[in-house]
Image (tube, coloured by chain):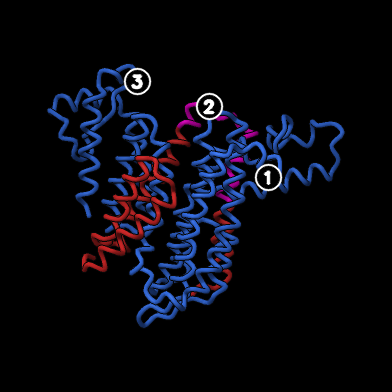
Chain colours: A blue, B red
Amino acid sequence: MRFLWRTASSALLRDVGLVCLADGIVAVSFGATSVTRVGSSGGLAWWVPVALSLLVFAGGAQIAAVGIVLAGGSPVAAVVAGAVLNTRLFPYGFAVADVVGPAGPAAAEFPAAGHGAAGHGAVATARRWLVRALGTHVITDESVAFALRQPTPQRRRSAFWTCGVALFVVWNLSVLLGIGLGSVLRDTNAFGLDATFPAVMLALALPTLATRRTKLAAGTGAVIAVALTPVLPAGLPLLAALGGLGTQWAGRRNWAGRRGLGFPGGRGRGGGQRPAHGDEAAMDSRDETAMDSRELSAEGKR
Amino acid sequence: MMPMIAIVALAAVTYGFRLAGPLLRGRVTVPVAAERLFSDAATVLLIALATTAALTAGHGFAGWARPAGVLVAGVLAAKRAPFPVVVVAAAGVTALLRLAGVH
């Protein structure tokens, strides 16, 4: 672990520290709202947010699950909603699979590393598995976002572990702090704490919106998720947002159709289909226009 | 109420989702296109989570104060403001609007 801190650049450490501070605020908010009595419904026992933070360690799912039971929903609904929210960890796992295990050339190949490496005893193998198990647990929005922003494998690993471990410690301590404050802060919404979680998600996601095709997929997904939230159970609209990835295959064919329809009006399913790669330069301005109108229509759904 | 068994169940499912990628990666070769798709999927989910968390509460509209705070935070983030500034701005704008009677 010391190795990781040493290789982490000071810029990375600063950014991770800032994310930890931001998430700490969210965690304090989560701890406080979990145990605070709201209206007629009592708060949850102190160990509920503690156990969720230690064992589940996924902010969105924790907040959703607690929100559901505090609103009178069943624990089953809370588990299902949390599980659906956490399906996003599935693609995350593939995105950072190369850095979750311990460092070193042999360890890069998972999981057969133990067999091929002569001279490694059972202890070393067990240790590698333990590191891998811990690394798997700290796959989060934040650690993945940090890893994906790095240009080299070594920096990816360093960023992932630095962020993941630091966040686990800060998150759990902050939840404890929040539980302590829960009795003092009677109305956490008055402090705007509910705005901190989406703000953190947004700040993390913006740098990953590097290419036009990613922007288009994300913009479309956001519109889908917001549009379906009134009609689907909690968590499902988020899964439906993955439909935004369909814009990547729609490509040239729909682009032609869109031109025929006189876009960029950019509204609904037909709007803003991206052209195939070769057309990128030529279509830049049109795509930007479509993107803007999509964002506006997302805001319009408030 | 939230029994321990429910928390453990959620934890187990969550760990399973996290484990799939690291477990399968060494056994199956993931094409570059698929890796790019997974990373795009993660971005799509993050943005969708941010948007729904900003705009909605339960099945309805969250009110104006929260999305306004998140919007300010988003602009600051796009201008590469430090994370705590982004977060405090989100909470501050939202809290001030509510103080002013905007909900």
The mark total stands at 3
Amino acid on which disc 3 is placed: His
Q: Position of residue A204 (x, y in %)?
A: 43, 44
Q: Position of residue A266 (x, y in %)?
A: 19, 36
Whole-angstrom CA distance, mark 1 to mark 2, is 23 Å
Residue displayed at 29% across by 52% down:
A228
Whole-angstrom CA distance, mark 2 to mark 3, is 19 Å
Residue A277, label in figure? 3
Of helix, strand and loop, which one carries label 3? helix
Residue displayed at 61% across by 40% down:
B22
The relative height of residue A1 versus residue A58 in the rendered view (above or below) is above
Amino acid on which disc 2 is placed: Pro
Residue displayed at 33% across by 69% down:
A190
Q: Position of residue A289 (x, y in %)?
A: 21, 31
Which of pointers 2 and 3 indicates the residue nearer the eye? 3
Residue B38, label in figure? none
Question: Label 1: chain?
Answer: A
Q: Residues within 10 Å of mark 3 (few under 14, many from 20)?
A: few
Q: Are marks 2 and 3 in contact (CB under 8 Å)?
A: no
Classify residue A286 as left or right of residue A180.
left
Question: Label 3: chain?
Answer: A
Q: Residues in magenta?
A: B16-36
Of helix, strand and loop, which one carries label 2? loop
Mark sitting earlier along the chain (1/3): 1
For mark 2, what is the residue? Answer: B31
Which of pointers 1 and 2 indicates the residue nearer the eye? 1
Quadrant housing residue A261: top left
For mark 1, what is the residue? Answer: A132
Of helix, strand and loop, which one carries label 1? helix
Amino acid on which disc 1 is placed: Arg
